[in-house]
Amino acid sequence: MIDIDIEVRRAERRIALSLAAEGGLTALFGPSGAGKTSLLDAVAGLVTPERGHIAIGDAVLFDSASGINLPPEQRGCGYVFQESRLFPHLTVAGNLMFGTNRADQGYRWLEPAEAIEFLGISHLLDRRPATLSGGEAQRVAIGRALLSNPRILLLDEPLSFLDASRRNEVMQVIERIRDELALPILYVTHDRVEVERLADRVVDIA
Amino acid sequence: MIAGLTSGEWAVIGLSVKVGAVAVIGAMPLAFALAWILSRKRFPGKVLLDALVHLPLVVPPVVTGWLLLLTFGANGPVGRWLAEWFGISLVFRWTGAALAAAVMALPLMVRAIRLSFDSVDRRLEGAARTLGAGRWRTFAQITLPLALPGVAAGAVLGLARSIGEFGATITFVSNIPGETRTIPLAIYTALQSPDGGASVTRLAIASVLLSLAALLVSEWLVRKGAGR
């Protein structure tokens, strides 16, 4: 159960998101510069909303009325950034394992070996992020987020830096996460094709 | 040429390296903390703190040495306190030379370390937080390893600066053979004596080689940091 109603200030604008959903993949759809990333940052705890509340499952992550504002490390949001943000000084394996010792083990979706198999990245484990292609890096970033025992997965235009064939590859991975793991997903995009293929519901961000 | 160094000259080089190493190790915690504060924090008086840290870089070293003498000398407030409570005196001692070198090296160290903190991508720190790492774990496992080549480069630069220190040292702890006579002071002394020419040449070459090695190591560390 996802229950989000927030207002985020970004520069001089206010961006609002109101969303109640059971699970599945929710697309936040809107043009570039609409502030979609700021909304994901607010859910993850990297940005503090002006007001509102964020609840995932039975956990309240943020509530301006009662003064709740969990730090990012306690929110359990598996965040896949637009530009991967893999740790350059760690190997792929080191990146994948970084979040696995999160204290809350209640959301163990996959064992590391399963995730590596699932994402098709077993041949990359000893490599450094700088040597990966865009598609490889994005699959590793998805794996890293999945293995951090997240309550929810946040995907920020994960396909934007990929060519057509790599896009398809990563989209298949996302579909499997949605269908086989039944992990709730917030998916930011400005691409109608991605929305039609992946989303269970769409929220327009103007 | 290096093989031609006399045992006295080797002792001078040894003393210089000891003074430099102690200066850098002693200054590192402060340099690290100042670099962190100047890179990451915003507070009133930051510009002033920044200026104070850089002061030894622009003030004549003789003035810095004189101020050290006023503060840490036998009648200085800190000097008297150290003598009364710990029986420590820095004046005319190699430890005083290390203090002078540390003060002179501090700005260079802070600059290098601060640049390396500035260059760490803050977004990686945010990513680490979302993966369940608290502030300390994020610092220890993301920020620090990424900044480490710059920290090491700062230490090497500080070492080179310390070994080259002259003005503040001779003013604060004088020029005492075997105690405070480091390479620059030994060269200065040899220049004063009529038959010191060969010694000057040998020590000058040794100090150029030491400085060159330090610069190359520092450059290599910075490249290593940038290359990944």
Image (cartoon, rainbow, N blue to C red):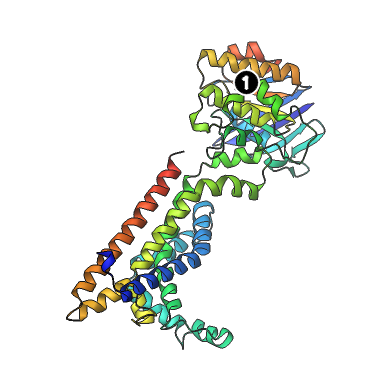
Which amino acid, mark 1? Gly
For the question of whether residue A11 can be seen, the reply is yes
Q: From the image, which quarter does the N terminus of chain B lie in?
A: bottom left
Question: In the image, residue B96 lies at what x, y percent?
Answer: 43, 78
Q: Disc 1: which chain?
A: A
- Residue placed most toward the observer, A180 or A202: A180
For the question of whether residue B44 can be seen, the reply is no
Q: Mark 1, residues whose alpha carbon is within 10 Å: few (<14), some, or many (≥20)?
A: some
- Name the residue at 72% across, 32% down: A150
Question: In the image, residue B49 lies at what x, y percent?
Answer: 47, 63
Q: Quadrant of residue B130?
A: top right
Mark 1 — residue?
A: A120
In the visual, does B128 lie left or right of A163? right
Label 1: element kind: loop
Question: In the image, residue A182 lies at what x, y percent?
Answer: 76, 20
Question: In the image, residue B175 lies at what x, y percent?
Answer: 33, 81
In the visual, does B48 lie left or right of B129? left
In the visual, does A122 lie left or right of B177? right
- Name the residue at 68% across, 33% down: A43
Residue B58 vertical placement versus A78 (above, below): below
